[in-house]
Image: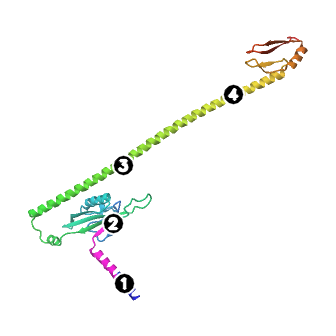
Amino acid sequence: MKSQSVDKDDLDLQAEADRVVLRGHAPVGVVINREMEVVQFRGQTTPYLAPPPGKPSVNVLKLARNGLSIELRALISAAMKKGGVASKDGIPFDENGYKRMLNLSVTPLGDKRSPEKGAPDRHFYLILFVDVTPPFASVEAASERKPKSRNQNDQKATRLEQELAGTRDALRSAIESEDSLKEEFQSANEEILSANEELQSTNEELETSKEELQSANEELNTLNAELRNKNNELHELSNDIVNFLNSTRIPVVMLDRRLSIRRGLGLWVASGIVDRFGGSILTRSNVDPDRHGTCFSIFLPAKP
């Protein structure tokens, strides 16, 4: 038990020592997300980041001081593009009128894979600000200012050229990002136009099908009406024939186009009618194979 207590005390002491070292000697920095919004401050970042006047913002580019936004934009874009560490050393930085040198680095954190649809984005980036100003630089800056020598002018010119080159690189990176975004937007716009054309074509096909169905429906309605009229006419004609046959006292024989009897009175009934009214029946037969058969002609007096 005593050994475990000693080990626990050693672990607590080591953790406390690590916290003191990290707090006092580790470089300051911030953690940002893909939208360049600060989600965590690490250490005292006041010399490099400060809230701008106006509406509060956590965008690291808006918080950057003394022209650091250009360098930060370029490094963040590079880290996002290659998925690795992007750094730049020897960046000149003005702090309260004194020239200082700064090393910047951007390191990706979290899951490197693309987030699933609907899942929260776990891509974060650690930005570290490392002050690498030589110790004697602050002493010289605090001493009495001397006239600038030619060597100092050359150093200043070199520094300005480096700043100009960095600005050009940042501008080039911004232009490339803008061109890439334009291409993506153009591609998305073309896909939307293509989908719109397909929808229009589908709509036209549906309209054509609808018109064809309406036309077929109208034709079916017309045919249905015609068939209904024909059926009514046939029904009326059938009723008329039946009524006529039931009401007349004259023998009637109905023939088809081949002169075949379709409907009429029987010969025995016809003979009785002829005898009753004093008429006569004439029979004529044909033995021709094409038109063979027997024809009965009934004659009745006009006034019985």
Q: Mark 2 — residue?
A: 31
Position in image of residue 10 (x %, y %): 34, 83
Q: Are marks 3 and 2 in contact (CB under 8 Å)?
A: no
Which is nearer the N-term, disc 1 or disc 3?
1
* Residue in the picture at 30% in, 78% down: 20
* Residue in the picture at 17% in, 61% down: 159
Residue 94 falls left or right of residue 17: left
Label 2 secondary element: strand
Residue 52 appears in view: no
| Residue type for callout 2 | Val
| Residue type for callout 1 | Asp
Q: Mark 4 — residue?
A: 229
Which is nearer the N-term, disc 1 or disc 2?
1
Q: Name which quarter of the figure residue 21 lies in.
A: bottom left
Label 1 secondary element: helix
Which is nearer the N-term, disc 2 or disc 4?
2
Nearer to us of marks 1 and 4 is: 1
How far apart marks 3 and 2 lie (CA) works out to 29 Å
Residue 151 falls left or right of residue 284: left
Q: Name which quarter of the figure residue 89 lies in.
A: bottom left
How far apart marks 1 and 4 lie (CA) works out to 109 Å
Which region shows up in magenta? 12-31
**Label ID, residue 27:** none
Which is nearer the N-term, disc 3 or disc 4?
3
Q: How is the image coloured?
A: rainbow
How far apart marks 2 and 4 lie (CA) works out to 87 Å
**Label ID, residue 185:** 3
